[in-house]
Amino acid sequence: MSPKQRKWRWIFTVVVLLAALVTTGAAVGWYKLLREVDQPPFASGDERFKYGSLGGENEAGIPYWIFVVLPRMFPEYLPGPGGYASLGVAWEEGHELPIGFTKKTVGFPRVSNTCAVCHTASYRESPDAPPVFVIAGPAHTNNIQGFFSFLSQAARDPRFNADNILAEIRLVTDLSWLDRILYRFLIIPLTHQALVERNFDWMSREDMAPWGPGRDDAMNLTKYFMLNMPEDGTYGPTDCPSIWNLNKYRPEEGMRLNWDGATYDARSVITDSALGIVAKPQADFAAQMDWLVEYLGSLPPPKYPFPIDQTLADTGHSVFDAQCARCHASTRTGKSVPAEEVGTDRNRIASWNKAAAIAANRTATELGAERRGMVEEALDGYIAVHLDGVWLRAPYLHNGAVPTLRDLLTPAAGRPAQFYRGYDVYDQQNVGFITQGEAAARTGSRFDTRRRGNGNQGHEYGVDLSDADKDALIEYLKTL
């Protein structure tokens, strides 16, 4: 073989080896970082709603093993002992993650959320009773702001580094040598960067009361996280709503969704909420939305689980027809009532506007999300809500500022100025949850109606009824 032939043979060999290395590296990189593994099939639609991935793991998921060890590393940034349970999440016995949290492998195991994180209610008959979880109910115990705050503070702590996190992971699992390298030089640094760059500071300004369990500032979350709009100083915390029986909303009759009627139909609300989770829709996103619309559309509201005095409820039906039906069981239901008429706190309305709606519709279209969208007009009222399952939707008003139905039938000046949200022992007499006392204070979060966005004024309907009529009306409302 001539020197020239040997030279070209050597070049060829090197090229082949380099190509093999690149191909192998690409295959390993895909397998370890991008390979998507379907979740096992779910036994029911309820299980899929609670734990089924919407695709958030791909763009916004937290590496599973980092998620596991963070509470052990930074317990001081949680509300109390118990890890994530201290945030009031709904957690079924025998499950490795709370309801509304998903685990899926995209290269490596990752954690994300489902709609159930904000829409699973719980109640207990007594302090010693186990919790009953109700799908599509308002997650009145879940401290969403506390979760954001925990992640932000943990990421900014200098102990959030590869050495410390890998040391903690070694206590719970044995990563392979390659996984340890990937975690050290890629996964942990990228997770840290993503958490540090996310601005959570606007949630905790001095002039803004804590959301407390069961609430979020949904429209500002949309403006600042999804739309990257500049902060405008508004503050509109609202309760997580129930989302069962969505077929009751009939957009063809002028009904709208969201507390202020900002969205045309159920698919739009579901889609926009899901976009807040997934960041970037995956290939099956439209099919996922189709399933959620169908599942939630026909999901019945829960029946009141305690005894009902039916004779008293029948009397209450007449009181309801005279006092409540004109808004909550009429052609007005599902439509906006002017804020001046209902008189409730205006901060939620002020947090959203026509420009934000236009930007949200444009962004959703650019992401490839198919939905009718948000209403591109100025809004100045609150929706007269349907009352199905109202017994489980406490605290009441759009911002959750009134603890029970009985309190709602009291003039605003006589309603509790402070109470505790987040305790799930049920108050059968007043219809709501126990919001005062040592147990409520220990488990819940203090809610001050004098703080911005927390006003309990307005909706003074039925406040002049006799005590007997109020008792009857409350008994009837249990049946809805």
Image (cartoon, grey):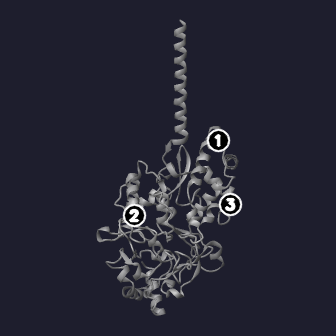
**Do callouts 2 and 3 mark residues in contact (Cβ within 8 Å)?**
no
Q: Nearer the viewer, residue 154 or 46?
A: 154
The disc, 3 or 1, on the residue closer to the chain's N-terminal end is 3
Identify the amino acid type marked 3: Pro
Local packing at callout 1 (Cα closer than 10 Å; few below 14, some 14-19, many 20+) is some
- Residue at which label 1 appears: 180
Identify the amino acid type marked 1: Arg
Q: Give the mark toward the camera: 2 or 3.
A: 2
Local packing at callout 2 (Cα closer than 10 Å; few below 14, some 14-19, many 20+) is few
Give SS at disc 3.
Answer: helix
**Do callouts 1 and 2 mark residues in contact (Cβ within 8 Å)?**
no
- Residue at which label 3 appears: 75
Instruction: Give the position of the C terminus as an image quadrant.
Output: bottom left
- Residue at which label 2 appears: 355
Q: Quick one: which residue is furthest to the left in this view?
A: 252
Q: Quick one: which residue is furthest to the top in this view?
A: 2
Residue 430: image location, x then y, percent: 52, 83
**Would you place residue 16 above or below residue 118 in this image?**
above
Which residue is located at x 55 percent, y 15 percent? Answer: 10
Q: Give the mark toward the camera: 1 or 2.
A: 2
Residue 222: image location, x then y, percent: 47, 61
In-image side of 315 versus 194 (left or right): left
- Residue 50 at least partly seen: yes
Identify the amino acid type marked 2: Ala
Residue 81: image location, x then y, percent: 68, 64
Which residue is located at x 59 percent, y 50 percent? Answer: 193
